[in-house]
């Protein structure tokens, strides 16, 4: 019964499953994937009672399938057709259970989500068992309530001694406690198996998380290597060439001592070259790590980015209080790389930067009026995505042809 993976309506879903919330919700307000707003207590109670009825329907389905299709499931020639009939009914029952969880418990499940035939049958088997047991527990609770009414009537009429009534109350209270605990546990089981069937299981979520962490770690390593290569390239193609030119100018000035005017001109040219060399060296040092982050903070560091940019940059900074150092560093490099790309490659005439703190998440937005077409998988933006993902953040690039380009990042501060 491995079968093809389909959604519970029998159609092949077009995309990958969505992530879910692994947290459990207990009781009759059980959790979905992820949970939505839970319904009221009477609505959840009606949903639980309806679950008992659907469990009976599922039991009849299994018994009928076993009676009618049992022989066909055993024969190789008829097994595929019989299994198709069985799974058609199972998917309808599963869709009914999903609707029950959504309507009465407020659960929200990813749509669509791939569910194998084996997973559907396993869910229905557990659901039938849990629903029938829940029906028995509810019946015992109703029976206990009737007995409590008879006991109260006997006490009021004086036909039952107070000592016997007290013993019955203690015994009934203990049974009521066990009954309610049973309902609570069955409600939690119903929520858990629904989440396991209609959304990614906790094991799947853990596997995804491990994959994401491994991918983010690899991306960070690649970003660091790319940054090192860029620094080496800047030092080799820029600063080193300027140092060579400076040495040549000084050598020519030294050899031209016999012509003072020419020597003075060469020294002045060497001095200008040294000034340009210092400016470029300072720029490379800022790209490695901005010292202003340690001494002045993120706001002043971003002001330095605006001052060094060749086009106008308007920065709105709405963050009160201190930020974690890794978040500040990542935010600086996101803004710096985005502004640098806009100035060098997009043909933009203006850039706007907005930084604000929203409920424990640092939100960044860099927008330029350039020609667009930025490649999110390119070296610079790809490295930024890895740096942001290492902090469990999100980086989005919206850059249609013709512009504008908007880069947004969200960095958790906890």
Image (cartoon, grey):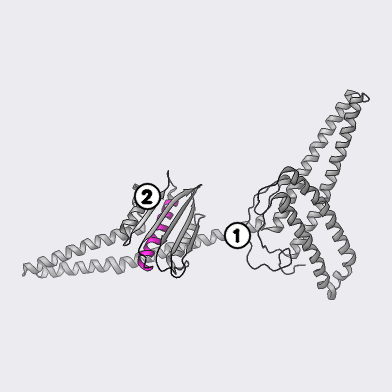
Q: Quadrant of the N terminus?
A: bottom right
Query: Is residue 349 found left or right of 153 in the rendered image?
Result: left
Tag 2's secondary structure? helix
Residue 130: in sight, yes or no? no
| Dot 2 crowding, Cα within 10 Å, few <14, some 14–19, many 20+ | some
**The one of 405 and 70 positioned closer to us in this rendering:** 405
The image quarter in which residue 346 lies = bottom left
Magenta stretch, residue numbers = 326-349
Magenta segment includes 343: yes
The image shows residue 318 at horizontal and vertical percentages of: 42, 48
Magenta segment includes 60: no
Residue 133: which disc?
none
The image shows residue 112 at horizontal and vertical percentages of: 67, 63
Residue 299: which disc?
2
Give the residue displayed 6% in from the left and 70% down from the top. 259
The image shows residue 157 at horizontal and vertical percentages of: 92, 25
Query: Is residue 87 found left or right of 220 in the rendered image?
Result: right
Residue 208: which disc?
1
Give the residue displayed 45% in from the left and 48% down from the top. 324
Query: Is residue 161 found left or right of 306 in the rendered image?
Result: right
Instruction: Please identify, in this view, whether the residue under mark 1 or under mark 2 is nearer the observer.
Output: 2
Query: Is residue 26 found left or right of 52 in the rendered image?
Result: left
Tag 1's secondary structure? helix
């Amino acid at each position: 019964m491995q079968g093809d993976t389909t959604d519970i309506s029998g159609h092949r879903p077009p995309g990958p499953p969505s992530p879910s919330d692994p947290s459990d919700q207990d009781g009759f307000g059980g959790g979905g994937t992820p949970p939505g707003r839970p319904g009221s207590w009477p609505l959840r109670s009606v949903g639980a009672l309806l679950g008992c009825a659907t469990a009976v329907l599922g039991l009849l389905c299994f018994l009928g399938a076993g009676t009618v299709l049992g022989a066909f499931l055993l024969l190789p020639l008829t097994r595929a057709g019989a299994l198709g009939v069985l799974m058609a009914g199972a998917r309808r029952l599963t869709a009914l259970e999903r609707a029950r969880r959504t309507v009465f418990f407020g659960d929200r499940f990813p749509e669509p989500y791939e569910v194998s035939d084996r997973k559907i049958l396993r869910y229905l088997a557990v659901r039938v068992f849990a629903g029938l047991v829940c029906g028995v527990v509810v019946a015992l609770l109703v029976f206990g309530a009737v007995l409590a009414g008879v006991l109260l009537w006997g006490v009021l009429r004086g036909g039952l001694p107070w000592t016997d009534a007290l013993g019955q109350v203690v015994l009934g209270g203990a049974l009521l406690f066990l009954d309610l605990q049973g309902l609570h546990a069955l409600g939690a089981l119903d929520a858990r198996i629904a989440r396991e069937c209609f959304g990614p299981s906790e094991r799947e979520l853990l596997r995804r998380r491990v994959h994401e962490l491994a991918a983010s770690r690899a991306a960070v390593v690649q970003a660091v290597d790319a940054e090192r290569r860029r620094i080496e390239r800047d030092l080799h193609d820029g600063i080193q060439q300027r140092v060579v030119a400076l040495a040549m100018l000084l050598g020519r000035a030294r050899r031209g001592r016999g012509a003072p005017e020419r020597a003075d001109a060469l020294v002045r040219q060497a001095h200008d070259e040294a000034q340009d060399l210092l400016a470029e060296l300072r720029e490379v040092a800022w790209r490695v790590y901005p010292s202003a982050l340690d001494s002045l903070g993120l706001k002043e560091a971003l002001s330095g980015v605006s001052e060094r940019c060749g086009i106008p940059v308007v920065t709105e900074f709405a963050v009160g209080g201190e930020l974690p150092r890794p978040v500040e560093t990542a935010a600086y490099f996101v803004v710096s790389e985005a502004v640098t790309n806009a100035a060098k490659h997009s043909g933009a005439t203006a850039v706007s930067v907005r930084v604000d703190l929203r409920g424990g998440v640092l939100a960044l937005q860099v927008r330029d009026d350039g020609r667009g077409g930025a490649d999110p998988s390119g070296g610079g933006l790809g490295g930024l995505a890895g740096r942001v993902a290492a902090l469990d953040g999100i980086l989005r690039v919206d850059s249609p042809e013709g512009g504008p380009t908007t880069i947004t990042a969200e960095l958790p501060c906890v």
